Structures are given as structure tokens and as C-alpha cells.
């Protein structure tokens, strides 16, 4: 502490104002705690400024353009023009509304927002340094760390903000690149690759293994791979990026396959989307009793307590999956535990969604992981080509697959197809409620709607499907 410093006391200091942090701060305040939320920027975090919101806004625009150009069998003819700068402007408006909304919520619930960078001096005190270099000290009863994560560089290809860019820079481009090479084939690569292809970019994806979206059921991914091919996206499987040069202002990237064969790819930009690292630097964690795992993420228990009894951690900094819905839930759990409730992160499953084309959404165990976990299972599948709603939309690709124990308890639901991101919520709810196939099959679904496919898949698993 600097001599003469005024020390401000609070019940809960939340470090990081992304989905994990601002949710924790508001919930703690709702439960009567005196809360200070500190962030280097306005609250909102990666999700609002660099992640979910900007990417899904641009993906929505790209899908809109694509759908107008490709009306399928509907008899509609259309042509479309777009201005990427105006689309970006609209994206900023969406972000601004959410930023202002979160600021208003913090004010409404009495959360004091402090702009600056937090550094833990001990397990009960943190120093906040603002952008102008001034600093202040805060003493807390409890702290919640929600500092998130940042994009990982591909070894040997450091980000330079020009040729080699991260997802945030890709989402801010004011000119659609002619040619884009993407390193990695996780969900960000597939979402942004598909989006740029729909904006008119020639996209090439370099993947070190023989699969894209390797953590997802192959059957779901197959449909996405096929669509990417029709969009002209080239995927270089089993290739490793080796070196980079430039030619006429373009990047020339040399990639090498497993047998040593070299290929050169040209691009205006190279997007590295190869995972994330936790934001733990310059946080002073060494002055606390917090322990990290071997990848640098903060170790937490089911109440999101760290090894330091006063400090909790939530969101990306506390490990995978790196998604906002997990951060939201963890933030609430940590705040509720601090306020004395019996909350725990004891959810039965976390839904994962990829805004690819078609969308993938999955929750719970797939066939392979259920068998590996020792369950005897039965499955049921319902294709969208048999759904009236999918036929109306002319989006008949895809299916819903239900995995259940032989006694009928649902273990997982996996969807590929239009609006899978919307359909997964009912699946998630079913698993959270420990539903059986009969529960899902016996729930009356409005007709004609896509969610009927969930009930049909459950009936298929029960061996009594009507519509196929
Ligand atoms: C391109 C992209 C697309 C994505 N799409 C989706 C999606 O569709 N759905 C989904 O669920 N997830 C998506 N994600 C992931 C999602 O954005 C993150 O999982 C989520 O934002 C994590 O929330 P968080 O609260 O843990 O951290 P963050 O949102 O990263 O927030 C951390 C905050 O901590 C602040 N901070 C860091 N260090 C300090 C410090 N020392 N002092 C003060 N403040 C500090 C940062 O400024 C930041 O505001 C996407 C991510 C990316 C990159």
C-alpha cells in the first residue's frame, strides 16, 4: 500500500466484467452484498466486444445475404448488394446497446463499477490502476476472479494485426478479404470461415489433424463439412503451417503434410484460431493461495472456490468449456455461495452450439462417450427431411439424435440442422430435469415446428416413431 492511500472496503470485489464477472456482481448485489466490479474497459467482456455478439451479428448478416442468393426450391428469385462498412456499423450499434444495457443493470442493482487493472496484493487486498496511472486500494471479504481468456498464437506465426490476425481483428475488418487462410479447425474457425465464404472470400482452412470440430460427433460434423465444400471452402487436413513470406502485399504461407509434401497458399490475411489462454498475467496471483492447473487455468471446486478460501474464479479463466453460458452460471453460483446459499455448479450438462451451416448443437453424452462411461444405451434419430416445418423452410438437412440409458433416462441430445441453436434449449432442460424418453415423447409440441423433431427422436428411441 502506498502511504497516504485511502483504502476502500467492500464485501465482494469482482475482477473482470465479462459474462462471468458482471453476472456474479449483480447477483451478489441482489443478495445484499456491497459489490465493486473492476474491469480494464466497460463491462461486457470478450462476449460483447470480441466474441459471441460481434461474431453472431456478422454471421446473421452473412446468412441473410446467402439465403437471398440461394432461395432453394421456394420459387423466389433475389439479388443482393451489401456494404461491409454498414454491416460493421450495425454490429457496433448492437454492441453499444448491450454495453449500455449492462452498465444500466450495474447501476440499477447498486454495483459500483471501477475502470482499471486489478492486481492482488494479498488474499484480502487488491490494487486497481486506472488508464491514467492513478491507483487505489480495495479491501474485500471475498473476491471473484473472472478475467477470461485471450486468443492463443500459432507457434512461429505471431499476431501482427495486419497479415496474421486473431478472431477479434477478423471480426473488425472493414474490407472483405479476397483470400483468407485460417489456422485451426475448432468452432471459431468453422463459424468465421463459413461467414467469410458467404461474404465472398475464398477461404482455406489448415488443420493439423484429419478432422474438423474434433470434439463433436462425426455424424453431425459430416453435414457441416459437406456444406463448407459447396461454399468453396478448402480444408487442408493433416497439414502444418511452416513458414510465411510476402508477395505483392499478400501473405504466402507454406504448409507441410504428414509426408513432407509442401503446398503454398496465398492470402490477404491469415486468421489464427487455435484456442485460448487464461488471463492470469499481472494479476498478482502469487500473492494469494490460488493454484493453477497445468495449462494455467485457476483450479476451482464445484462452488467455484479456489484454493484460497476468500477467492472464487468463474468463466474462461477457470477452465473449459470456454463459452458464455458456462460463465453466466458459474458467476451466479460463486455469488450465491458467497451470500451463504447452498448453490453449486452441479449442472448435469452444458449445451454447446456452433453457428455453422447447418448449425450444430449438442448437450450431454454422445453415443461414444456414453459407451465409454459404461452405460448400456439406446438411441433414436429423427431426420429433418420428415419434419413438416423443415420442409416449409426448405431446410431439410440434418437430424436430431437422442442417446438414452436402456431404462429410458436421457443422457444426451445432438442436433445438426437449421436452428439447432434454438432447439437445444429444450434438450438441455430435459437433461437438467433428468427426463426420460417418455417425458420428451409425451410432451405436446406445437405443429408444424422444428422442436417436434425432439419428441419424434425420443419416440424413435422407444421404437414407436410415427412420422418415419
Ligand atoms: C470469436 C469468438 C466467438 C465466440 N462465440 C461464442 C458464442 O457464440 N457463444 C458462447 O457461449 N461463447 C462464445 N465465445 C466465448 C465467450 O466469449 C467467452 O467464453 C466468454 O466471454 C467468457 O466470459 P468471461 O466472463 O470468463 O471472460 P471475458 O468475457 O473474457 O471477460 C473478462 C474480462 O476481464 C477483464 N480483465 C482481464 N484482466 C483484468 C485485470 N487484471 N483487471 C481488470 N479486468 C481484467 C477483461 O477486460 C474482460 O472484460 C466466443 C469467443 C470468441 C473469441
Image (cartoon, rainbow, N blue to C red):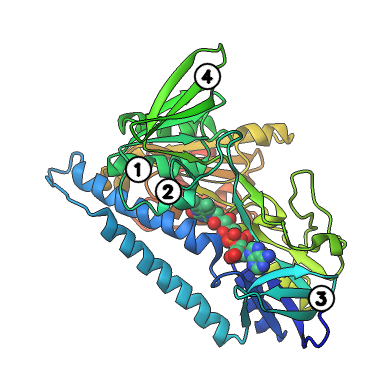
Relative height, residue 207 to residue 38 (above, below)? above
Which image quarter is the N terminus in?
Answer: bottom right
Q: Residue at x 50, y 45 (%)?
A: 160
Q: Nearer the viewer, mark 4 or mark 1?
A: 4
Q: Residues within 10 Å of mark 1 (few under 14, many from 20)?
A: many
Residues at marks 1 and 2 touching, judged by CB atoms closer than 8 Å: yes
Q: Disc number at residue 170?
A: 2
The residue where tag 4 is placed is 256
Q: Residues within 10 Å of mark 2 (few under 14, many from 20)?
A: many
Nearer to me, 62 or 434: 62
Q: Residue at x 42, y 46 (%)?
A: 453
Q: Give the CA separation, mark 1 to mark 2.
A: 10 Å
The residue where tag 3 is placed is 125
The residue where tag 1 is placed is 196
- Label 3 vs 2, first from the N-terminus: 3
Q: Secondary structure at mark 2?
A: helix
Q: Give the CA separation, mark 3 to mark 2.
A: 38 Å
Amino acid at each position: 500500500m502506498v502511504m497516504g492511500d485511502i483504502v476502500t472496503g467492500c464485501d465482494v470485489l469482482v475482477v473482470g466484467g465479462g459474462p462471468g464477472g458482471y453476472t456474479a456482481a449483480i447477483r451478489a448485489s441482489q443478495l445484499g452484498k456491497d459489490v465493486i466490479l473492476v474491469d480494464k474497459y466497460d463491462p461486457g467482456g470478450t462476449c460483447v466486444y470480441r466474441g459471441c455478439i460481434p461474431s453472431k451479428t456478422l454471421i446473421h448478416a452473412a446468412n441473410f445475404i446467402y439465403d437471398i442468393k440461394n432461395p432453394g426450391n421456394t420459387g423466389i428469385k433475389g439479388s443482393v448488394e451489401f456494404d461491409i462498412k454498414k454491416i460493421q456499423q450495425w454490429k457496433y450499434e448492437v454492441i453499444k446497446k448491450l454495453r449500455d444495457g449492462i452498465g444500466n443493470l450495474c447501476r440499477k442493482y447498486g454495483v459500483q463499477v471501477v475502470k482499471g487493472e486489478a492486481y492482488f496484493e494479498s488474499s484480502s487486498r487488491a490494487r486497481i490502476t486506472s488508464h491514467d496511472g492513478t491507483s487505489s486500494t480495495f479491501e474485500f471479504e471475498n473476491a471473484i476472479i473472472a478475467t477470461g481468456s485471450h486468443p492463443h498464437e500459432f507457434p512461429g506465426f505471431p499476431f501482427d494485426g495486419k497479415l496474421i490476425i486473431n478472431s477479434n481483428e477478423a471480426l473488425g475488418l472493414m474490407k472483405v478479404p479476397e483470400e483468407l487462410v485460417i489456422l485451426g479447425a475448432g468452432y471459431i474457425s468453422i463459424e468465421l470461415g463459413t461467414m467469410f465464404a458467404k461474404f465472398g472470400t475464398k477461404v482455406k482452412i489448415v488443420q493439423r489433424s484429419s478432422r474438423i470440430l474434433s470434439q463433436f460427433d462425426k455424424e453431425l460434423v459430416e453435414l457441416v463439412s459437406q456444406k463448407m465444400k459447396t461454399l468453396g471452402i478448402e480444408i487442408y487436413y493433416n497439414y502444418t503451417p511452416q513458414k510465411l513470406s510476402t508477395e505483392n502485399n499478400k501473405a504466402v504461407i507454406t504448409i507441410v503434410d504428414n509426408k513432407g509434401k509442401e503446398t503454398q497458399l496465398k492470402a490477404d490475411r491469415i486468421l489464427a484460431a487455435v484456442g485460448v489462454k487464461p488471463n492470469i498475467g499481472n494479476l498478482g496471483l502469487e500473492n494469494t493461495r490460488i493454484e493453477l492447473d497445468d495449462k494455467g487455468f485457476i483450479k476451482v471446486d464445484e462452488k467455484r472456490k479456489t484454493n484460497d478460501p476468500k477467492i472464487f474464479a468463474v468463466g474462461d479463466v477457470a477452465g473449459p468449456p470456454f463459452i458464455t453460458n458456462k460463465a453466466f452460471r458459474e458467476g451466479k453460483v460463486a455469488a450465491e455461495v458467497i451470500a451463504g446459499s447452498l448453490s453449486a455448479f452441479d449442472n448435469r450438462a452444458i449445451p454447446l452450439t456452433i453457428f455453422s451451416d447447418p448449425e450444430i448443437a449438442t448437450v450431454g453424452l454422445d453415443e461414444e462417450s456414453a459407451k465409454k462411461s459404461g452405460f448400456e444405451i439406446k438411441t433414436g434419430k429423427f431426420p429433418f427431411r420428415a419434419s413438416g416445418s423443415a420442409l416449409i423452410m426448405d431446410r431439410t438437412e440434418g437430424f436430431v439424435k437422442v442417446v438414452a440409458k436402456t431404462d429410458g433416462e436421457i443422457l444426451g441430445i445432438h442436433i445438426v440442422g437449421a436452428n439447432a441453436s434454438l432447439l437445444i434449449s429444450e434438450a438441455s432442460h430435459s437433461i437438467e430435469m433428468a427426463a426420460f424418453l417418455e417425458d420428451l415423447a409425451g410432451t405436446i409440441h406445437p405443429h408444424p415446428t422444428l422442436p417436434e423433431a425432439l419428441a419424434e427422436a425420443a419416440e424413435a428411441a422407444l421404437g414407436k416413431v410415427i412420422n418415419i
